[in-house]
Amino acid sequence: MYLHSVKPASGDVAAPPAVSRTYAWTVFALTFGLLLSDYMSRQVLNAVFPLLKVTWGLSDTRLGALSSVVALMVGVLTFPLSVLADRWGRVRSVILMGALWSLATLGCAISRNYGDMLLARAFVGVGEAAYGSVGLAIVLSIFPPSLRATLTGAFMAGGAFGSVFGMSLGGVVAAHLGWRWSFGAMAAFGFMLVVAYRLTVTEKRVGASRWAEEGRALAQPATRPSFRALLKGLFSTVSVNCAYVGSALQLFIMGAVLAWMPSFLNRYYGFAPDKAGVGAAAFLLLGGAGMILCGIATDRVSRVLPIRKWVSAIVYSLSSFVLLVVGFHLHAGPVQLVLIAIGIFLVAGTSGPAGAMVARLTPEAIHASAFGTLTLVNNLLGLAPGPLVTGMIADRIGLLGALQVIPFAALVATLAFVVGKRHYPGDLQHLATLEKAAASQKCFTSLERNA
């Protein structure tokens, strides 16, 4: 059975080959696997912090810099590298990125000193910078629009699962073979996936499936958009800007709560550090599950009325606010942990609908750039400042007080989704008008050339 068949253009001898469901899911599996490798290579460092500290006599500040340099490279390079991938080729870009972060992770394994390790970690960030946006653009280009929220949520959940695998497997390997083998194992996993991707996925085969938007085929433009046109396409409507902001604010909460969850369990439940880490990992997995299951639920309820994606995002964000505020105000105990767990599950649930709305509100030809923008906003407004702001508030009113305040960001996210929903129908009409005008201009230009 095939996902899509492409009609031949006039003058073509035969249509490009259709893309089978098996091939589409194979592409998803390999792309998701590389995302796991991405986060495993990034987070394995946390598992070997104590060993590095002893080996090189490092301060906590220098240890923290080894982690922060990756986030810095990702934040700075996500957007420009996503734009380049749209122009150079997404599949080729993915192969190059995976090879680079795997090679850099291997560099961590053979580092002779702190300087070598810091440089290698910087290149890990360079390789990983645009992978999330470009990989997601490839996945969405080969599946029907009705699965966008599901696929976006599932793909983004790979970050949570990869982080858990990286820390847990890295710790086990380090305990038995030493910290260098932890990095080496992650590098080997990445290289194997890169080879499999290179042998399986090609631009031509991925390009054979370009799903219609509202019954129309979305083709690549004949000319690459200028930088000004690109920015216009990325930020052209109120609703797409609301999707960016709402998604980021929800991840602000998730990043803050998960970063401080080990400390919360240690201080208020008396968990030993290792037990607190395991408990925090469980909450992280719940967040990943929320991305997947809430994405599936969103696609199901919005099959007939796409605007229900906005309604789903509003429900998830508002529910997460109530659950987390109430949960962190309760006394320590099972009920508190259950409410916080459900809140974390839902706070991440907006990732699927938000990604689907960004895809719907931007041209397919710039989807890697669009998801690069979403990743950039998610990091700059969400994941990066969340833990820092929580720590700053905690220094003044205590960690529990800070965690009681942080969920209020979900109210602002809810407002952003409400505003986006109100503008959505008009923005779709505006985009349709622009597309018709662009198509007419393209046809007129073609007629002039043939005259």
Image (cartoon, grey):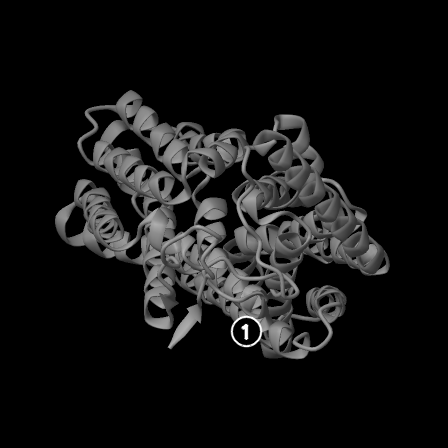
User: Is residue 110 in view?
Assistant: yes
Residue 41 occupies which quadrant of the picture?
A: top left
Query: Residue 262, position in %: x, y?
Result: 50, 56
Query: Residue 358, position in %: x, y?
Result: 65, 52
Q: Secondary structure at mark 1?
A: helix
User: Is residue 167 in view?
Assistant: no
Report the residue that reaches farthest toward the left: 177
Report the residue that reaches farthest toward the front: 451
Q: Which residue is mark 1?
A: 293
Q: Is residue 243 left or right of residue 132?
A: right
User: Vertical placement of 429 versus 371: above or below?
Assistant: below
The residue drawn where x is 58% and y is 70% is: 146
What is the number of callouts on the image?
Answer: 1
User: Vertical placement of 433 versus 310: above or below?
Assistant: above
Query: Residue 193, position in %: x, y?
Result: 25, 52
| Quadrant location of the C terminus in the rendered image | top right
| Quadrant location of the N terminus in the rendered image | bottom left
Mark 1 belongs to which amino acid?
Answer: Leu
